Amino acid sequence: MKRTLFFLLVAVILLIPCGVAYAYDGVEATDNSMTIEPADPASAPHINVFGNAIGGVEAGDLFQIDVSGTTVDTPFTLYITNVDELIHSYRYMNLNIGIYVQTDIDRWEKMTAIAGEPFPDMYITMQNGLVSFTLPGNAKYKITIEKGCFYSYGITPEKSVAIPSFYLTTS
């Protein structure tokens, strides 16, 4: 009898927090309506790679985010998905990430502050492979490469050069 009562008490204690967590997850999921789309390939960053050379990366757009349907702040993480390929083509690669907010139709303004706090410079490299940030709701954003630099290895005729690929997700 004591074992049964003890087992029931432990089961109730363990199951009560699960019900709260499921209710919280359900509310958060319905309140978070957004879209993430890759940018137009014509506006993508451009890298012109020469063998055994230091070079630059021309600015371009990576993703567009629409969180105008939600009022909550949303965390995002931007990944370089092919670091394993890049390490065979480059000694290093540093890319400065920019975030722009849409202020009018076809008008974008670079984010310099959120809620009065300065927005930090963000760099994604082959060493860190990702960068995380949080964006306020009720707006449209675009994620860009502002500038960058690399040092490439020698290129042989049969070797292809890797170009960074990116993936953006909510955290």
Image (cartoon, rainbow, N blue to C red):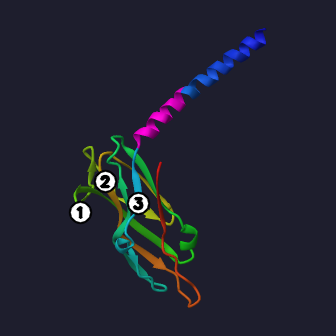
Res. 148 image quadrant:
bottom left
* Left or right: where 76 falls relative to 69: right
**Magenta extent:** 20-32
Give amino acid for label 3.
Glu
Residue at 46%, 71% (x, y): give it. Answer: 93
- Whole-percent x and y of residue 140? 31, 54
Compared with 165, 103 (above or below) is above
> Which is more N-terminal, label 1 or label 3?
3
The residue wearing badge 2 is 140
Compared with 120, 21 (above or below) is above
Numbered label attached to residue 106: 1
Q: Quadrant of the N terminus?
A: top right
The residue wearing badge 3 is 37
Mark 3 secondary-structure assignment? strand
Residue at 55%, 83% (x, y): give it. Answer: 160
Mark 2 secondary-structure assignment? strand
